[in-house]
Amino acid sequence: MGDLWDGLAQALWLVATLDPDLVEITLRSLQVTLSALVIACLIALPLSALLVVKRFRFRRITIAVLNALMGLPPVVVGLVVYVMLSRQGPFGVLGLLFTPTAMIIAQVIIIVPLIASIAHQALRDLWAEYHDLLISLNTSKRQRMAALIWDGRRALLTAALAGFGRAIGEVGAIMVVGGNIDHATRVLTTAIALETGKGEFALALALGFVLIAMAIGVNLAIHWLGRTEREGRW
């Protein structure tokens, strides 16, 4: 029991004193996840708006596939990215395996379906309200998509935060494609797994505190945005 309290005390000390290793790992996690989030939003948000505005042959199938991919096992994504970026893979010549770029690619693949599905549901409801107005104004499809994305930005931010929460806590795919290399690809989740295996509970707990704080912050932001969105509709 004493070891547990000692570990907690040391973990709190590491957080309070901004331990260099803790700060480095946290900043790298944020760099990778925020980069993946920006790229994923640039893909998912226009895609979700397009699925709302445009009617085409495989639209329903595309929506169904996006919803299904929300449950895609991250470790499988990591395996696919690993194969594609390995020396024998089609993109092996780029030398991206075991780099932050490979981790970003894996995270983008994981969170695009999640963000697109949540955004599609929000924009679909907004399109029901704006349909007649936008049609009467004789707007183009691009203008309709832009109007939906702008007016639904608060709901879309909720979708983005959900994607961030999913990405920041990912470990399977990141471990496979990043390799958990010290001072290169080690992030919060992989560092927690490594330090726990080594029995270094102080740093593992400190990293866990940071990860929990991020998760709580994201959930509080989603809750606040959802509440203000509902209040704005009244």
Image: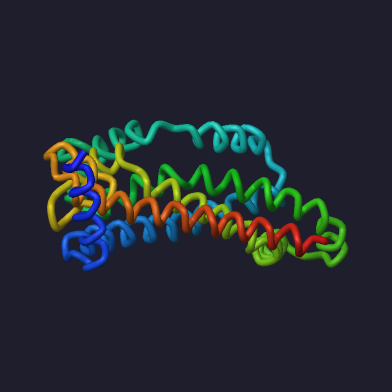
Question: Which quarter of the rendered picture does the C terminus lie within?
Answer: bottom right
How far from the left and from the top, in percent, is residue 127?
76, 54
Residue 80, picture quadrant: top left
- Furthest residue in direction front, as rendered: 2
**Residue drawn at the location 18% of the way across and 42% of the way down:** 2
Which sits in the foreground, 192 or 157? 192
Up-down: is 166 above or below 89? below
User: In the image, 12: left or right of 74?
Assistant: left
| Residue 199 appears in the figure | yes
User: In the image, 232: left or right of 154?
Assistant: right
User: In the image, 83: left or right of 213?
Assistant: left
How far from the left and from the top, in percent, is residue 10?
19, 55
**Residue drawn at the location 64% of the way across and 62% of the way down:** 154
How far from the left and from the top, in percent, is residue 41?
50, 57
How far from the left and from the top, in percent, is residue 175?
24, 41
Total count of labels: 0
Residue 232, picture quadrant: bottom right
Question: Which quarter of the rendered picture does the N terminus lie within?
Answer: top left
**Residue drawn at the location 24% of the way across and 35% of the way down:** 83
User: In the image, 72: left or right of 124?
Assistant: left
Residue 150, picture quadrant: bottom right
**Residue drawn at the location 84% of the way across and 67% of the way down:** 137
